[in-house]
Amino acid sequence: MSKRYSFKNDYSEGAHHEILRLLESSNFEQLEGYGLDRYSDAARDLIKKELADQSVEIHFVSGGTQANLIVLGSILRPHHSIIAPETAHINVHEAGAIELTGHKINTVPTPDGKLTPDLVKKVLDLHPDDEHMVKPKLVFISNSTELGTIYTKTELRELSEFCHGHGLYIYMDGARLGTALTADGQDLEMSDLSSLLDVFYIGGTKNGALLGEAVIISNPGLKQDFRYFLKQRGALLAKGRILGLQFLGLFTDGLYYKLARHANELAQKLAQGIKDLGYEMFSDSPTNQIFPIFPDIVIERLWEEYDFYIWTRIDGARSAVRLVTSWATPEKCVDGFVQKLRQLS
Amino acid sequence: MSKRYSFKNDYSEGAHHEILRLLESSNFEQLEGYGLDRYSDAARDLIKKELADQSVEIHFVSGGTQANLIVLGSILRPHHSIIAPETAHINVHEAGAIELTGHKINTVPTPDGKLTPDLVKKVLDLHPDDEHMVKPKLVFISNSTELGTIYTKTELRELSEFCHGHGLYIYMDGARLGTALTADGQDLEMSDLSSLLDVFYIGGTKNGALLGEAVIISNPGLKQDFRYFLKQRGALLAKGRILGLQFLGLFTDGLYYKLARHANELAQKLAQGIKDLGYEMFSDSPTNQIFPIFPDIVIERLWEEYDFYIWTRIDGARSAVRLVTSWATPEKCVDGFVQKLRQLS
Amino acid sequence: MSKRYSFKNDYSEGAHHEILRLLESSNFEQLEGYGLDRYSDAARDLIKKELADQSVEIHFVSGGTQANLIVLGSILRPHHSIIAPETAHINVHEAGAIELTGHKINTVPTPDGKLTPDLVKKVLDLHPDDEHMVKPKLVFISNSTELGTIYTKTELRELSEFCHGHGLYIYMDGARLGTALTADGQDLEMSDLSSLLDVFYIGGTKNGALLGEAVIISNPGLKQDFRYFLKQRGALLAKGRILGLQFLGLFTDGLYYKLARHANELAQKLAQGIKDLGYEMFSDSPTNQIFPIFPDIVIERLWEEYDFYIWTRIDGARSAVRLVTSWATPEKCVDGFVQKLRQLS
Amino acid sequence: MSKRYSFKNDYSEGAHHEILRLLESSNFEQLEGYGLDRYSDAARDLIKKELADQSVEIHFVSGGTQANLIVLGSILRPHHSIIAPETAHINVHEAGAIELTGHKINTVPTPDGKLTPDLVKKVLDLHPDDEHMVKPKLVFISNSTELGTIYTKTELRELSEFCHGHGLYIYMDGARLGTALTADGQDLEMSDLSSLLDVFYIGGTKNGALLGEAVIISNPGLKQDFRYFLKQRGALLAKGRILGLQFLGLFTDGLYYKLARHANELAQKLAQGIKDLGYEMFSDSPTNQIFPIFPDIVIERLWEEYDFYIWTRIDGARSAVRLVTSWATPEKCVDGFVQKLRQLS
């Protein structure tokens, strides 16, 4: 059939078959509702083991915007603001969900989508303790970022130390955490996270789950009453088993890393193929989102067989596009893309 | 094995196998995200057909509290309040989700969980157009109600006419709509709803879906920009297909009604068995929730084999309990319960 | 002239002349803005002395609804609810201001407008620690109440102890605190308050100020960053001196108590005159709001010369009305009212 | 005495004596509460005459942040955002008050604090109708701006036409409207405003009132139920007369313009004196806020006798300062400042 293969995102397909299998096998078991079932408990145990931290609290929610708005909307006091990269998902692509919870986002321009102590300090310097302004209280980062870049262990430790030294929480949006942790050359590991971050989430939706993100609360002061916050934002699913089963599948036998590594490898193979043909990249991404720069005329032709988004205009004749691979991307589609591009070049 | 059978609720099991089959069969198809996939479209078409109304707008969300808070939090202006039965789910069991969106609920005591024009009028009479008080703007009902009772066509029409005659929206929480429409003696039909209600939702979670409620907007003035409201409350799932597929399954070949009818029939069989043994009922429910009154000593013994909630204390020695059947309840469990009760009586 | 004298409320006139004099005498002095001027500081010092508590934090705001919404909207977490009498101003006459800050009010029917440990306990009993419901966290009382009744020292201590023993804050709306403290037979004193209450406000508007309420924070955990909360709700006046000067006037030479005592004395004289004529009272109020029950035909005639509100219907032929005296009520108007009533009786 | 004269702001003094006189003369008159008194009505009539528009609706509030948050928080739907200059008061100096009402501010860098159709268009271009992003709905401007600059009639008309042509409301913060309308060379008049703007406010606090801003609603669609919004944000003062009387004073015999002109003239005299001494200005302001650039060593010496804020660092040795004159600034203080500066130069 003539359907174009899509590199538009990493949520075009359903779920890894192991997850479907778990849904099927547990289907007629009567279970507690609202995330208190034994499968959700088992998934939490697996994740705690992976984090090498038994003290964290883990809650499953349906999606990334939901995770972000519940955490930020619940742990902050009314006058607290959030420091985030200008490109942050919460700033651009969540329809004002965070502001709807009442909080300003203090945005920071950053070319690679990452924050550093220096960038955060600039915002703090503009906000002495003055009640006519907001009080920045939380630093928001994504890993991997909107531009596919990653935080190494050293970078994250430095940022974390800066935040904690300045009375700031640090929160990580891990919608694509799998790809960040399995990127080539990455030294940051899952077991580093809970000591560096106050709260974060491990993304399931973009790494082989049907839906679901696991919110991890490390900071003891932020754990109290969190299930109330889930409930009052509509995030407690009656059949919470669905969320638990996703993570049970993902964290059995390292499936989570395997799927992310697959996405990364195919993206990097794609990037290499593109670079070998002489094209530049807009961002230096080691993960599953790559941003090659193509002439518009080439883009038009590529669209005949492949679907993807334009990221930004570069000049009058060229644009950066975003190509995203996923846990489900077949290698032959990557090869096909490069071959097609070679014909056009 | 010794596990007790649970009559605690109608969301203890997973999904009807037809829904699981759809998840499986469509799994590797690349689809548009956020509810714009072809399966969600197909489900919307089926529901419109069922409603006999092509003009409605249909959005799928994950759960009932989410449906309620998004609809009420989005269509009302800041000074608008909601008139609801004192027993309403939004008033008691949603952790203040509605107030978190900024709106007061004007509660009405009502023995059977239902509102009438007279009951609504009492609230209006207390709220002349006076800016020192809230302005009631929406009437909230559930069908079936928290007490298992139902609105007939005449009742709903009278309430609807009263609301529209007084500038009020009428909204129906249909978490258990299936059981309301398939109850014995009910004359209200799915195709009546969109002309009587401004907004309502058709519940999936409690009628055989893994998750999902279908929000139906009939009032043209309330349709605009609704997807923004979904997004900013975290309700737009990236893999929106999951929600669409539930309703595709439920509304193919009348499965929705079949499952609800099964739940009702077993509940009524259970009720009859209980009444035959001489017990009274706390509420006159024709649907899948029944509320027999048992001596506490009997309750203790029933709990050895069956799980269920106490609803309310009746006197020093008796309580009303809530027994809920579902699409998945086996008839033998109903029979077993009655048999056990007979032994105790 | 023919204008009717108004007993509608205690804010019909402007301010005590001493306050106007202060506005005049300080007018051209250049002062710090936003409540940091020396007059506001002096007023805070006077109030602290009156409270016999140097540890409280004091903030001036413009009105009672503003005080209530800022305190409640700022110190509570999103899932916290407020326990209040059904008749509470925040429940009935603030246009949903509290719910707009996101919090549910759990209302308690109470014939005299007062809460007791038993009444509060009933709400707590309905709210075990269950994340599907709100979590009651603050008890709201008014003193004097909407019905003119007052809390004695013993009553307030018992309620306070109950609250603190159950993890609840206790907050007092003191819009008419002056009348509560100066009522005949009252043993509660200003210097008792800060040890019994977590937060409260001393009302100026209804006791001789042009505007202004003094929010007193006793609980050390609630003091932090409060000026931010004032600012972000629009309560920090640029010329904050206006508020400070009101309280400087009111708390110099006991003016606050003198004005309240005047209002109480005239109301009680009015009540005695009415009772002497054989009329019953709807509420047993020792303060400046009294609620006599009159035949409707008498009310019609009284309205020819006096203005006042009907409070509630008693039966087919009689209503309870509300008569309010103020710091500015002339004794001759009270005498005139009784005389007129005598003629009608 | 040794006290330094303050050029820190235009709200250091109390009120014009005519306003105090009105407070005094009306003090014992019994009046309706909450802004429904005859003085407030008279003030509204005077303003309507000045606007040459009988159709507007006018509400008085206590301060600028209150005006902004009530208007923006009430007329926008939850997904609507506000386009504003990066320097806007609502973005920087209102402690996140606007975000607390739930709305994102899309900020626009602009060197002179003013918006143009081109600048607004850039924001619109980034926000196609896409539910993953906010929907810009209102353009926020100040006149005069934070930098003392003004909109001429042509500029405001072009911006207004652009907004209305693109479905955007246009709102003007008129905290310093008087100075904008009376600036040298200004052709915009009070009577132009209601046809160009959907909502705006006429600032009293910074132009000789004790407190108070007059919110003017021109757009008929935005008038409904506005008093509810005032009430539920705590803005309806019981003794609303205080606000009405301010504007009665200000709009009798052109006092409003006279006071603003005085402030402008003294600021311009000050600016000329400074420029004559060879200093540059950071902003080209024809109003009562001027921003000269001084060596830090000069600033230190000036602070011995005058109080003012540093606005921004220019380089290692110089800063721009903000000098603000008011309706109450004596000419001799301006002369003294220039003389002192001459001595230092």
Image (cartoon, coloured by chain):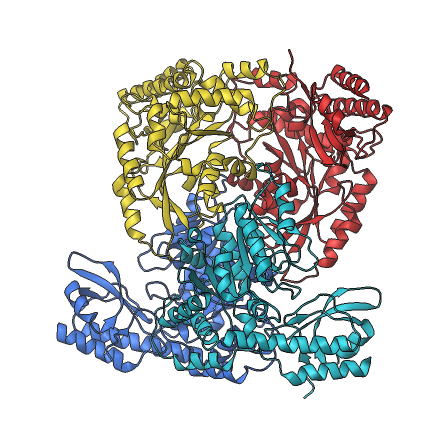
Chain colours: A red, B yellow, C blue, D cyan
When asked about the image quadrant of residue D290, the answer is bottom right
The residue furthest bottom is D1
Q: Is residue B236 left or right of residue D107?
A: left
Report whether C13 appears left or right of D134.
left
Viewer can see residue C167: no
Residue at screen point 59% across, 41% down: A69
Q: How many marks?
A: 0
**Between C84 and D329, the one nearer to me in the picture:** D329
What is the quadrant of residue C339 in the picture? Answer: bottom left
Q: Residue at left 39%, top 16%?
A: B258
Quadrant the N terminus of chain D occupies: bottom right
Query: In the image, residue D286 lies at what x, y percent?
Result: 65, 70
* Image quadrant containing the C terminus of chain D: bottom right
Q: Could you say where residue D6 lies in the image, as x and y percent from the top left?
A: 66, 78
Residue D253: x and y in percent read 46, 78
Taking B204 as reference, is B166 left or right? Answer: left
Q: Residue at x 41, y 35 (%)?
A: B220
Res. B142 image quadrant: top left
The picture places residue D279, in percent across and down from the top left corner, at 78, 73
